[in-house]
Amino acid sequence: MRTTFSQLPLTGVKIVDFGQYIAGPAVGMLLGDLGATVVKIDPPAGPMWDSPANAALNRNKVIVNLDLKTEEGLEKARALCAEADVLIENFRPGKLAALGLDFGAMRDARPELITLSIPGFASNDLERREQRAFESVIAASSGVFTDMGLNRVLMGINPSFSPLPLSSAYAAQIAASSTVLALQSRQVTGRGDHVEVPLAAAVMEGLCYNSIKVADMPERYLTQREKEIERRRVEGLPMNLSYEELQELLDPFFRSYMCKDGRMFYVVCPSHKYHAKRCLEVLGIYDELVEEGLTSEEDTYKPYAEWTSHVSLGVYPMPKDWADLIAARMKEVFMTRTAREWVKMFGRAGIPGGAQLWLQEWINDEYAEAAGLMIDLTDPVYGDMTMPGPVVWMEESGEEALTPEPRRWVGFEEALSILKKHRTDIPEATDANDQEAWLTGVRVLDLCNVIAGPHSASYLARFGAEVIKLDPAEPLYDSWNTVIYGLSQMRGKRSILADLKSRHGRQVFEDLVKTVDVIVWNAPDSQIKRMGLDAESLRKLNPDAIFCKLDCFSGVRRGVRTDYIGYDDLVQAATGIMTRFGGAMDRPEEHAHVGTIDVMCGFGGALSVATALYQKYRHGRVGRGRTSLSANSGLLQVPFAYDYKGRGLFDEPSGPEANGWDSLSRFYSTASLRHILLCAYEADLPRFRAVEGLEQLPDVAVEDRAAYLAHAFQNQPATEWVNRLRAADIGVAICENIDALRARNEQVFDGTPGTDRGSYSFSIYPDHPSGHEVVQLDPYAVRPARGKVYALNPSEKFGTSTRAILSDLGYSDAAVQRMLDAGSLSTSWSKTYLPG
């Protein structure tokens, strides 16, 4: 294990990890990569999930095999727990306590202890809490597989399977960030906490941009695909588009193009003021399209009826006539060069775009290795392995994080000795140092755009942080990107608009920097230095401020693509997610959900903030936290993101035809025409003897199981099969729909965060500031026992708080007005909240 001289921020934090499968062990991995000492407890026969992925999930851990069904095993486990700062488990609610390891009793004896539970469904969800909640069961129950993206709906592939462990990956990041937030709060208060993060709630938070419902959405924000879905539903037409037909409904700046070398290149620049123009300039077709009438509206936030033309470059979505024309020319030009050439040209020109890769290529990619996004480790079981590098790190200690210790099996006495080497130093708990929420008194400046960065800051607001969102006086992104996304990621924030290139705007910016504890930005290093937020310059402005950065391609080390800009979809292309989802190089598809990696990276950004705060309070060091979309893609693909000598094929389920893992874990249609997701293993076969209608399954040959089950499931409706299978404790779920889940679990906003309402919770905002009725997910995935979680205020209109924030900084009303008149500040981008 690491020495006490380590500079990693969580050095000295002692963790006992009871986690199995992915979510629990992944939390231990994230915290171990940041320097925590982790003792992993496995059953005598080894982990419940036997996978090479455990080499990554259990790095930086020592493993002790204990039988928790014996008194000896329990006593040893209790002895280890007595030395820990943090305990982690991810079983069904109450299971560990029933064995004799009661986290509540341990906290009563040691109030400074932090305990983390990651159940499948919430402990206060009486309907579902006892279900066998495997990854795919959670996904099916939470609407992940149904209406899975506009593409799959139009192709009539419904439900649609994905092997990505969304629930576990989101839960791991949320649980890790909340654990460290509890740790940093303990350094202030001396008090521990119990935190629950249900997988179902975590995946819903990951899908919050998909589940939001806005009444009377202006037509200008509807894409060609959305319009086609509505047309087919109104006219009673089937959803049967081919992949090729579907491509012609995509925006030209948000799709893949075939290149000279037979590899697809993904362009993601649909809604930035300059990206689309730069794209056409690099392709050499900008001038000719302008001659044909392509225009760029100066102010796209004014009503659409007031535009000089029906099209504006840099606005998403584009009208179909121009989309078709531009796409046709782009197809021709992309065929003149290889994908590798286009990567270099787009990257150097500051245009988001990249080549489609397979996961196997990404794992062995030279840049991924050079940047530390993929690292090498010698595992005691599999030998030399390549696996994802650290997901979150600190700039000053990131290099140390690139050389994790391989997992190591030890005896109980050695594990206990390892924990006892570290001393826990926390203040005495008194009324004077208590705080209502984990981040009470912490002030955050959010300089981010799009989803990942702004989402991280909004997440911090629920724990009591005061968040100020600073945006340009004139927007760089169109309203589809800012206002629509902002309905989710602007919650709990105050908004100020300032031109940082102007003298007065710069002064306002510096005054804000001097007053905050944390600054969050998703910008390349060159821009950060230009703004005076590099480490040396920031020390002069505010030596106590913590700076955390999120971006697209960064790893611990700099590389040729570090400063390339990009978005979620681009990382999906670069890391093999799109080729897996589509199933072939000539038919890649973006993973169906908005912000698949973005939201996870936002939670990773929050982990970096929490870690930097803990390091400051515990070790007295002011650090700079980091994460990236590319780094988070490793966590999202952790079940298969590894390579070693003798590894089998990269053959995880892929393509639109995939319906599960095998005959015991896949979709089946039922007599009610509703699909169920069966999730069983070979060890579960004897359980089927007790299921009426499936008694003969254990006797059926492996190759005949799918046919047997498909025929049997047609004899009863979905609800009946779910009842029968659950009675035998077999994993199963009806494939739910997000719209239906929302409708069944919504209520008018009552000022609470939803943490008391089970696994699913939505609030209706009839009087939302946008003027539209909005229904959206509650901030409810993190459920602390002590720290308060706040219901977030609805997103205010951009610029609403400009005057108030300036007043707080000491500016007079007259001075503020002069800056507004000069254009250095703004109180709005548009007349209406949502430009129509």
Image (cartoon, rainbow, N blue to C red):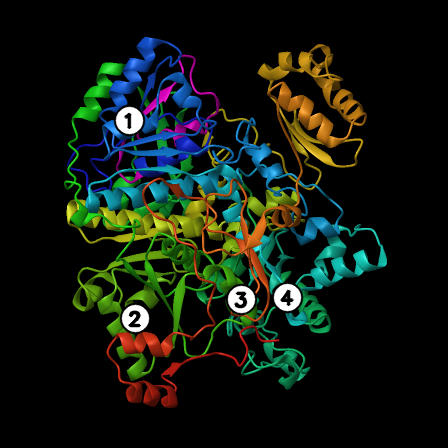
Amino acid type of the residue tagged 1 in the rendering:
Met
* Label 3 sits on residue: 768
Going from N to C along the chain, the mark reached first, 3 or 1, is 1
Residue at x 32%, y 49% (from the top left corner): 608
Q: How many marks?
A: 4
Residue 20 percent across, percent down from the top left: 44, 26
Amino acid type at circle 3 is: His
Residue at the image point whose x is 69% and y is 82% from the top: 292
Per the model, the C-alpha gap separating discs 4 and 2 is 35 Å
Is 39 a magenta residue?
yes
Residue where numbered disc 1 is placed = 106
Check contact, mark 2 vs mark 1: CB within 8 A: no
Q: Are marks 3 and 1 in contact (CB under 8 Å)?
A: no
Q: Amino acid at mark 2?
A: Arg
Q: Nearer the viewer, residue 342 or 21?
A: 21
Q: Nearer the viewer, mark 2 or mark 1?
A: 1
Q: Which residue is mark 2?
A: 530
